[in-house]
């Protein structure tokens, strides 16, 4: 169906039906609005990101044993 045929069909409808078609078009346009993602890019350069490895020079964190122990005790708790 061409645009002109669609327009002719639309114009052949009674006024109430035309108003319903217009309302449907407005509804569909609002429903299918696509917006930009919140962040401009999800491609993060983790190798060169300053956040990664920010604690690598901390001497007090040489051993991750305390983290493992904390995870083991906290993650195995049964909450009920």
Image (cartoon, rainbow, N blue to C red):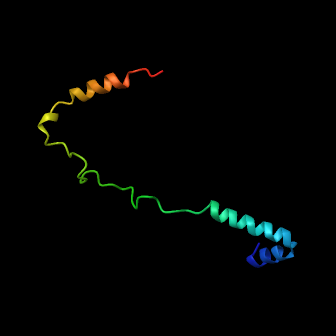
Residue 66 in the image: above or below residue 7:
above
Q: Quadrant of residue 22?
A: bottom right
Q: Quadrant of residue 60?
A: top left
> Residue at image x 34%, y 25%?
74
> Residue at image x 17%, y 42%?
56
Residue 80: image location, x then y, percent:
48, 21
Residue 26: image location, x then y, percent:
69, 67
Residue with the most extreme front position: 80
> Residue at image x 81%, y 73%?
10
> Residue at image x 17%, y 34%?
61
Residue 59 in the image: above or below residue 39:
above
Residue 66: image location, x then y, percent:
22, 27
Q: Quadrant of the N terminus?
A: bottom right
Residue 59 in the image: above or below residue 24:
above
Relative depth, front residue between 18 and 42: 18
Number of numbered markers: 0
Residue 21: image location, x then y, percent:
77, 67
Left or right, 38 with reference to 2 = left
């Amino acid at each position: 169906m061409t645009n002109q045929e669609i327009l002719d069909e639309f114009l052949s409808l009674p006024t109430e039906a035309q108003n319903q078609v217009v309302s449907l078009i407005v509804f569909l346009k609002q429903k299918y609005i696509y917006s930009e993602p919140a962040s401009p890019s999800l491609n993060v350069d983790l190798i060169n990101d300053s956040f990664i490895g920010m604690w690598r020079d901390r001497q007090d964190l040489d051993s991750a044993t305390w983290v493992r122990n904390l995870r083991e005790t906290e993650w195995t708790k049964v909450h009920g």
